[in-house]
Amino acid sequence: MFKVYETKCDQCLFSKDRIVSNSRRVEVLAECKRRDSHFICHKATLLNQDVCCRGFFDTQTSQLIRIAGRLGAIEFVPLPPQR
């Protein structure tokens, strides 16, 4: 299953409260596009998981997202508890 968070986190790359600069955001998105990949939410990386950022899922795409969608293999999962 291709996992996507149900909602954006409080520091989402696609929100005004993101934890990176706008120029870094542009770099990250350009790299995702170049690699035809998705953006893994930083909260998932802290847990050593691969969960697509909801903001990315709602506004961008990749081959994997399109294939998972066609196969009905997208699973929306809750955000982890805040520490």
Image (spheres, helix red, strand yellow):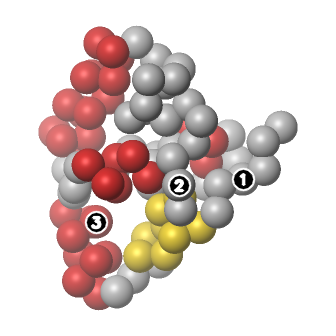
Identified by mark 3, the residue type is: Ile
Disc 2 designates what residue?
A: 7
Compared to residue 25, the image places residue 52 above or below, namely below
Q: Residue furthest right?
A: 83
Residue receiving disc 3: 65
Please give left or right for residue 80 compared with residue 75 in the image.
Answer: right
Instruction: Identify the secondary structure beneath mark 2.
Output: loop
Coordinates of residue 24 in the picture (x, y in percent):
35, 17
Crowding at mark 2 (Cα within 10 Å: few <14, some 14-19, many 20+)? some
* In the rendered image, the vertical position of residue 2 relative to residue 19, given as above or below: below
| Residue 42 location (% of width, % of height) | 56, 38
Q: Image quadrant for the C terminus? A: top right
Up the image or down, 54 lies above or below 64; here it is above
Mark 1 vs mark 2: in front: 2
**Distance between the alpha carbons at the discs numbered 2 and 3:** 17 Å
x and y percent of residue 15 in the render?
43, 31
Residue 61 as seen in the image, left or right of residue 72: left
Cα distance in 3D space between marks 1 and 3: 22 Å
Which mark is drawn over residue 80? 1
Q: Residue at x 70, y 48 (%)?
A: 47
Q: Secondary structure at mark 3?
A: helix
Q: Earlier in the sequence, mark 1 or mark 2?
A: 2
Residue at image location 39% in from the left, 82% down from the top: 73
Residue occupying image coordinates x 23% and y 75%: 67
Q: Nearer the viewer, residue 59 or 50?
A: 59
Question: Upstream in the sequence, badge 1 or badge 3?
Answer: 3
Q: What residue is at 49 percent from the left and 75 percent from the top?
A: 75
Q: Is residue 82 left or right of residue 20?
A: right
- Report the amino acid beneath label 1: Pro
Which residue appears farthest toward the bottom when viewing the image?
71
* Label 1, residues with CA under 10 Å away: few <14, some 14-19, many ≥20: few
